[in-house]
Amino acid sequence: MGFIWALGASIVVSLISFVGIVSLLLKEDLLNEVLFLLISFSAGALIGGAFLHLIPEAVEKSAHGEVYLFVIAGFILFFILERYLHWRHCHEGKCEVHTFTYLNLVGDGVHNFIDGLIIGSSFVVNINFGVATSFAIIMHEIPQEIGDFGVLVYGGFSKSKALFYNFLSAITAILGTVIGFALANMSGGFLKLLMPVAAGGFIYIASCDLIPELHKQEDIKKATLSMAIFILGVAFMYFAAAVHH
């Protein structure tokens, strides 16, 4: 049963790659407003997912000291992956265009594969835990996929080709889910390793990619709204954790 849920979650994550088409249907100002709110909620959900779900679950299953070392290792791993694989977290529909368009797709493929590993492993713990973890990933994927679609179009791809290649890079999440679920079932050690590493990745994405975007908002009312939405994202994960326990 857990595997069916995990597979369903990874399929949803993969289908989010088509959300890029929304950027063509909305006016730029409205799109930026929607993305800003999504980024705020996503940042809160990722922070909440790391500190309220993944790290506590990892601490329950492992010695405390090694958990936090693996959290730091996850943070460093995502820093290295973003630096050298050039996967993008552009938001607001504005992305730097360069010649590494295909490398960007490879980076996204690796990123989505890791997301799949996390999804598959989380459903081995239990379904509620898996749903909450997948939700945090999905909320982050929506603004990212809109940005990735923009990179491909601005990089010279036709809109249909951009959607197709973006989807190809996204379905690696399904492969990651199958492998993650199998490995977590075969070895408790894999689950103990992946959860704190994933938590470090969540913290990196929220603190280094998403929250800096929020600081760019100069309008005090919108900035205050973004903080409230961020807290709402954390609160959502808190209540999800309460349901899990």
Image: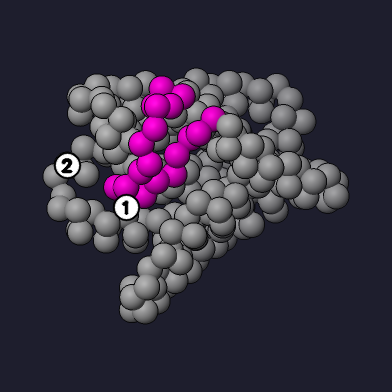
Which class describes the residues within 10 Å of circle 2: few (<14), some (14-19), or many (20+)? few
Q: Residue drawn at (36%, 36%), measured in percent from left and top? A: 97
Compared with 152, 56 (above or below) is below
Tag 2, which secondary structure?
A: helix
Magenta residues, start to end: 85-103
Name the residue tied to disc 2.
Answer: 24
Q: Residue at x 54, y 49 (%)?
A: 205
Give the x, y percent position of residue 47: 56, 57
Amino acid type, callout 1: Glu
Residue 3 in sight: no
- Quarter of the image where the C terminus is located: bottom right
Disc number placed over residue 92 in the picture, else none = 1
The correct choice, above or below, for 19 with respect to 55 in the image is: above
User: In what element is the residue under mark 1?
Assistant: loop
Horizontal side of 232 relative to 181 (left or right) equals: left
Callout 2 amino acid: Leu
Residue 81 x %, y %: 59, 34
Dominant secondary structure, magenta: loop
Query: What residue appears at the point 37 percent right and 21 percent down from the top-left corner?
Result: 168
